[in-house]
Amino acid sequence: MPLANGMSRDNSHLMQRTLQPELLDSLPPDHPDALHYRRDICRLNGLMGNFRWFRAKLPKLLHPGERALEIGAGDGTLGAALAEAGVSYDGLDLWPRPAQWPHDVAWHRTELLSFAGYADYPVVFGNLILHQFSDDDLTALGASLGRTARLIIANEPARGRYFQFLARRANTLIGANHVTLHDAHVSIAAGFRGDELPRVLGLDKKIWTWRCTTTLRGAYRLIAQRR
């Protein structure tokens, strides 16, 4: 699949997804390195335009009265940005409920693969979370979402050598710590290309339509809607 603005692919399209442990997963949420990482990822989200993309796309795709679920909600920054855009949402993450998380908004502290409440959410979205899971895990998640979800929106790392180079430059620019440098590298290696994500989620083309795009700044984006 061509990159944005007519940029041609290099031979990185031969790369396969590879999963390695991320350093952040070994740290408690209040560890100084984890706090530094969260600062870094906030800046990287800004550079990549990830939150702007969600704010531009998600409100327009919601049906009246629908409540969305953010998987991998982290520190709640994306949810807060979407709340300002009028999105009704709840959060799910293994991390504790953020201090700034609204009191009237649910926080499900659980593993997304074992969460039993997907039927309550016709809209599920996530930012930089799905690449952390194996193909088998993503297929299992897709089976759960496929039963009840109407809309799935995801922003993930695009996989490729160019994007590894770009991430190193960006992380140097923002003064990223060793956790961010390591996790950015392994995240991109576990990222997606083409229509890999909807395929590995097991979305049926007879039931779903989807659009996958890749930006020059290294974002892989999926919008999947039930027909």
Image (spheres, rainbow, N blue to C red):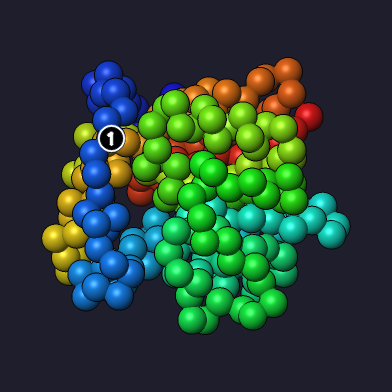
Relative to 77, does residue 162 appear above or below in the rendering? Answer: above
Q: Position of residue 106 (x, y in %)?
A: 65, 68
Relative to 142, does residue 110 appear above or below in the rendering? Answer: below
Q: Residue at x 27, y 30 (%)?
A: 18
Q: Position of residue 144 (x, y in %)?
A: 63, 35
**Which of these two is toward me, 145 or 210?**
145
Q: Residue at x 32, y 36 (%)?
A: 190
Q: Residue at x 55, y 58 (%)?
A: 92
Query: Quarter holding the N terminus?
Result: top left
Residue type (three-letter) at the residue carrying disc 1: Leu
Q: Which residue is mark 1?
A: 19
Q: Position of residue 222 (x, y in %)?
A: 55, 39
**Which of these two is toward me, 133 or 126?**
133
**Which of these two is toward me, 85 or 142?**
142
Question: Seen in the image, is 50 located left or right of residue 187?
Answer: right
Relative to 59, does residue 197 appear above or below in the rendering? Answer: above
**Which of these two is toward me, 71 or 64?**
71
Q: Is residue 146 visible?
A: yes
In the rendered image, which quarter is residue 8 located in? Answer: top left
Q: Is residue 52 visible?
A: no
Question: Seen in the image, is 32 located left or right of residue 150?
Answer: left
